[in-house]
């Protein structure tokens, strides 16, 4: 039954994606001349994720925490990474962010086209030139008054422990003098496990933490900033897991 239900849900996601493409194309064409940051196109692209979650009876996703009063004040948002479902969860936040994502995803038909219209940023793992171009892409979006979203672990952890955070997002935050916006995610690991295509029942939450200002910081302070943000996310994630009733051994809701 789980396999059948999962097949149906993937079909539903496929239909939503197909229907969303012409809608997003219209938004992109209408707004592109006066919206260089592609804020409108990106915002509408994220709404597709919200619709997909709403149509999934296995998932109960929500957001909480600090409210961003000015959606056009740019932040360098960073989050832990538990599952591909993190993307669908964080997309519920009511302001637009441009995502740093693997270049391979941009090559997918339809999804990749929409990501390009939305102004998301591709990166190839393990290539120095690609990383440099991606960091420049982050600076470009921030300069156009749009926040960016980076998962500094680089990939999903297979264990309960967060992977080390990479420096790139924090370097950009210091160089631009913009605040880092930590986001803690809990509950998604069981929703769609790494290496599996099956949907599981899950309650998940993304909690926005207080921004960490970088004004006046130098690159010498990057390790301290990175470690402080990682520690805040770890603590908030642990609190979320307790509130959601997630078992520490299985990541399942108990």
Image (tube, rainbow, N blue to C red):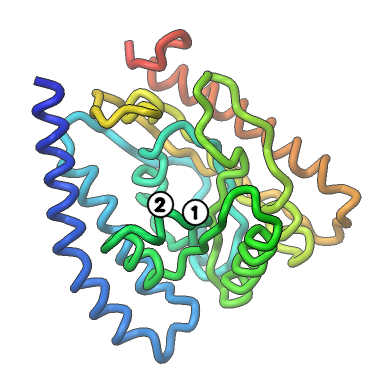
Camera-side residue of 17 and 71: 17
The residue pinned by badge 1 equals 101
Label 2 crowd (10 A; few <14 / some 14-19 / many >=20): many
Residue shown at 51%/61% (left/top)?
A: 122
Residue 7 rendering spot, x and y as whole percentages: 13, 35
Residue shown at 38%/67% (left/top)?
A: 42
Camera-side residue of 68 and 192: 192
Q: Nearer the viewer, mark 1 or mark 2?
A: 1
Decide which of tag 1 and tag 2 comes sooner along the chain.
2
Residue shown at 20%/58% (left/top)?
A: 17
Residue shown at 59%/66% (left/top)?
A: 74
Camera-side residue of 104 and 58: 104
Please say if 204 is above or below 91: above
How many numbered callouts?
2
Relative horizontal placement of residue 122, taking residue 53 as reference (left or right): right
> Is the N terminus in the top left, top right, bottom left or bottom right quadrant?
top left
Could you say whether the residue bearing mark 2 is in a helix, strand or loop?
loop
The residue pinned by badge 2 equals 93
Residue 196 rendering spot, x and y as whole percentages: 31, 27
Relative horizontal placement of residue 231, taking residue 233 as reference (left or right): right
Tell me the number on the disc at residue 129.
Answer: none
Relative horizontal placement of residue 245, taking residue 73 as reference (left or right): left
CA separation, marks 1 and 2? 18 Å
């Amino acid at each position: 039954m789980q396999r059948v239900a999962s097949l149906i849900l993937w079909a539903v996601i496929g239909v939503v994606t197909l229907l969303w493409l012409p809608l997003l194309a219209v938004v992109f064409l209408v707004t592109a001349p006066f919206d260089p940051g592609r804020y409108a196109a990106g915002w509408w692209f994220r709404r597709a994720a919200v619709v997909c979650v709403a149509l999934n009876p296995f998932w109960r996703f929500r957001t909480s925490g600090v409210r961003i009063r000015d959606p056009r004040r740019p932040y360098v948002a960073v989050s832990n990474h538990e599952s591909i479902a993190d993307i669908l969860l964080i997309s519920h936040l009511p302001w637009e962010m441009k995502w740093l994502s693997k270049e391979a995803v941009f090559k997918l038909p339809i999804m990749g086209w929409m990501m390009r219209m939305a102004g998301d940023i591709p990166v190839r793992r393990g290539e120095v030139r690609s990383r440099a171009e991606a960091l420049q892409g982050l600076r470009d979006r921030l300069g156009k008054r749009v926040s960016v979203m980076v998962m500094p672990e680089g990939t999903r952890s297979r264990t309960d422990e967060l992977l080390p955070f990479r420096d790139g997002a924090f370097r950009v935050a210091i160089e631009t003098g913009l605040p880092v916006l930590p986001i803690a995610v809990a509950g998604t690991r069981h929703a769609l496990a790494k290496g599996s295509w099956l949907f599981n029942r899950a309650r998940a939450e993304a909690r926005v933490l207080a921004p960490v200002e970088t004004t006046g910081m130098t690159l010498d302070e990057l390790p301290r900033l990175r470690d402080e943000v990682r520690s805040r996310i770890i603590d908030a994630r642990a609190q979320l897991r307790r509130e959601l009733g997630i078992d520490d051994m299985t990541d399942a809701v108990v």
